[in-house]
Image: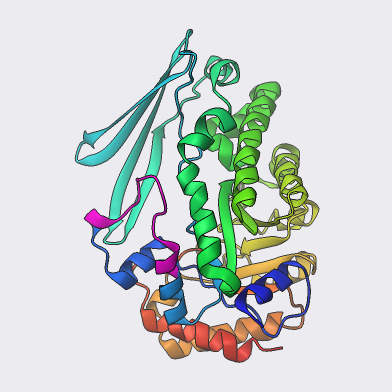
C-alpha cells in the first residue's frame, strides 16, 4: 500500500495495512534538516516557504507518512488595492523597538483602517507573527469591508496565484507517496484576523447582528480560498479552530461558533475534499460538539498541561467515524524523552486506539527546533512497528 493510498483510505474510512505515522514536521524542521540560515529562510516572501521537494527528502529520511502541509497560501488574508481607487492599501515594513513590524493602512472614501503586525525570529529556524492592532475596531470599520473590499477572485487570487501553484507542485512531487493539505482559518479564527479576540467574545452579546454579519462575511472569503486550494489539488483542508476552545464554553461554542464552522465543512465536502478541524488546545468541554460539525477528522487531542484532553475520554466521546489525530506532546515530551521512552509512548497510544481505528499517529502540534532527530526517528519506527493491523 502506498503512502497516499494509506492516508486516502483512512479518510474514506476504508481498511489500511497500518496506522499512518504523521508527526507534524513544520517548516522549521525542514530548515533545520537542511541547516538553512535565517537570512535565507522564506517566511515572508510570496511562494513556497520551503520547496516540496525539500520536505519530501526530509520526511523520507525520518521514514514517516507524507501529510504535506507546507504548500498553502500564506497571504490569503493580505489586502490588495481595488482597481476603482476606493480601497487603497499601503503596507510599510520597518523596525520598531528592534522588532520587525508591518503597518498596513486601508483608505476608503469614508475612513482609514489600520493594522499593526509584529514578527519575531524566536529561534534559528522559527519565525512567528502576531497582530497587535486590528482593522475592525468599531462597526463602521467593518462596513468598509462590505462596501469597498474587492472580491477574493478579483484581487487576492491573481496576486498570490504562485502560492496556489505550490499546491500543484507539491502534488507532482509527492505523487503516490502522500497527500496534500491546504490550511485555512475556520470561521471564528478568520474573524480574529480582523478584530481583537476580546471584542469578538463580547460581540454576540452586545450586538448579535454585527457579530453574525462579520463571521459570515469572513467565512465566505475563507471558502473562496478553499475552492482554489481544492482546484489546485489539495486533498484535505485543515481549518484552524484553536481560538474557540473549552475556554469559550459549551454554550458560546454551540450558539455562536458551531453553525459557522459547519458551513465551511459542508463546502469542503461539496468540493470533494476532506476536512480536518485543528484545535491544538483545550477541548474537553466542547469536543462532544465536534460530532455535530460534520468533520472528517479532529486534531490534536492535546493533553495537560498544554491542553485539557484526556485520551481515554476522547475515545468515549468522539464518534468512531471521525478520524482522530495527535495526542503525543511535542512541547516537552518529544524534546526531553529518550528514544526508548518515545517508542513506549507510541506503543501505549496505539494499543488503545487500534481497535477503534480511524486514527493518524501524530504530535499535538508542530515539532519545535530542538526536537532531537533521533526522537522523530523513534516515533516513526515505533509507529510502523506497533501500528500494523
Image quadrant where residue 364 sits: bottom right
Magenta stretch bounds: 39-55
Type of colouring: rainbow
Q: Nearer the viewer, residue 45 or 96?
A: 45
Residue 336 seen in this snapshot: yes
User: Which residue is pictured at 33% across the width and 65% down the height?
Assistant: 31
| Above or below for 83 versus 66 | above
Quarter of the picture holding the C terminus: bottom right
- Closer-to-camera residue (172/342): 172
Report the residue at 64% width, 49% height from top: 231
Q: Is residue 246 left or right of residue 373?
A: right
Residue 363 falls inside the magenta stretch:
no
Residue 14 in the image: state x and y as whole percent. 78, 75
**Which residue is found at the position 64% from the left and 29% from the top?**
217
- Quarter that holds the N terminus: bottom right
Q: Main secondary structure of the magenta part?
A: loop
Comparing 240 with 178, the one in front is 178
Write the residue at 51% across / 63% down: 365
Residue 60: x %, y % from top left: 46, 79
- Out of 279 and 221, give the one closest to the viewer: 221
Percent from the top left, x then y, of residue 375?
42, 82
Residue 304 in view, yes or no? no
Q: Is residue 376 left or right of residue 224?
A: left
Amino acid at each position: 500500500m502506498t503512502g497516499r493510498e494509506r492516508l486516502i483510505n483512512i479518510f474514506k474510512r476504508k481498511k489500511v495495512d497500518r496506522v499512518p505515522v504523521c508527526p507534524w514536521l513544520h517548516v522549521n524542521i525542514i530548515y533545520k534538516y537542511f541547516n538553512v540560515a535565517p537570512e535565507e529562510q522564506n517566511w515572508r516572501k510570496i511562494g513556497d516557504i520551503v520547496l516540496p521537494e525539500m520536505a519530501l527528502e526530509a520526511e523520507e529520511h525520518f521514514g514517516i507518512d507524507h501529510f504535506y502541509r507546507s504548500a498553502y497560501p500564506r497571504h490569503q488574508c493580505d489586502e490588495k488595492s481595488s482597481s476603482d481607487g476606493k480601497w487603497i492599501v499601503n503596507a510599510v515594513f520597518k523596525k520598531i523597538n528592534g522588532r520587525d513590524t508591518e503597518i498596513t493602512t486601508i483608505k476608503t472614501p469614508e475612513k482609514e483602517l489600520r493594522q499593526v503586525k509584529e514578527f519575531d525570529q524566536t529561534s534559528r529556524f522559527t519565525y512567528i507573527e502576531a497582530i497587535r492592532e486590528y482593522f475592525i475596531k468599531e462597526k463602521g470599520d467593518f462596513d468598509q469591508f462590505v462596501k469597498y473590499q474587492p472580491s477574493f477572485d478579483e484581487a487576492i487570487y491573481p496576486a498570490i496565484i504562485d502560492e496556489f501553484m505550490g499546491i500543484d507542485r507539491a502534488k507532482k512531487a509527492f505523487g503516490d507517496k502522500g497527500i496534500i493539505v491546504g490550511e485555512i482559518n475556520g470561521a471564528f479564527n478568520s474573524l480574529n484576523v480582523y478584530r481583537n479576540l476580546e471584542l469578538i467574545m463580547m460581540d454576540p452579546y452586545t450586538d448579535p447582528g454585527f457579530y453574525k454579519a462579520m463571521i459570515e462575511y469572513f467565512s465566505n472569503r475563507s471558502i473562496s480560498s478553499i475552492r482554489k486550494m481544492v482546484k489546485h489539488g489539495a486533498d484535505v483542508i485543515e481549518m484552524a479552530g484553536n481560538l474557540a476552545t473549552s475556554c469559550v464554553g459549551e454554550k458560546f461554542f454551540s450558539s455562536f461558533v458551531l453553525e459557522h464552522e459547519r458551513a465551511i465543512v459542508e463546502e469542503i465536502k461539496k468540493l470533494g475534499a476532506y476536512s480536518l478541524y485543528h484545535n491544538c488546545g483545550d477541548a474537553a468541554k466542547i469536543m462532544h460538539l465536534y460530532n455535530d460539525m460534520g468533520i472528517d477528522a479532529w486534531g490534536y487531542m492535546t493533553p495537560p498541561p498544554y491542553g485539557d484532553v484526556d485520551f481515554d475520554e476522547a475515545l468515549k466521546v468522539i464518534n468512531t467515524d471521525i478520524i482522530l489525530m495527535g495526542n503525543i506532546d511535542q512541547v516537552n515530551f518529544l524534546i526531553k524523552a529518550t528514544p526508548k521512552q518515545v517508542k513506549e509512548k507510541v506503543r501505549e497510544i496505539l494499543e488503545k486506539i487500534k481497535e477503534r481505528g480511524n486514527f493518524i499517529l501524530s504530535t499535538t502540534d508542530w515539532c519545535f527546533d530542538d526536537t532531537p532527530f533521533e526522537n522523530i526517528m523513534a516515533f516513526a519506527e515505533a509507529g510502523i512497528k506497533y501500528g500494523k493491523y
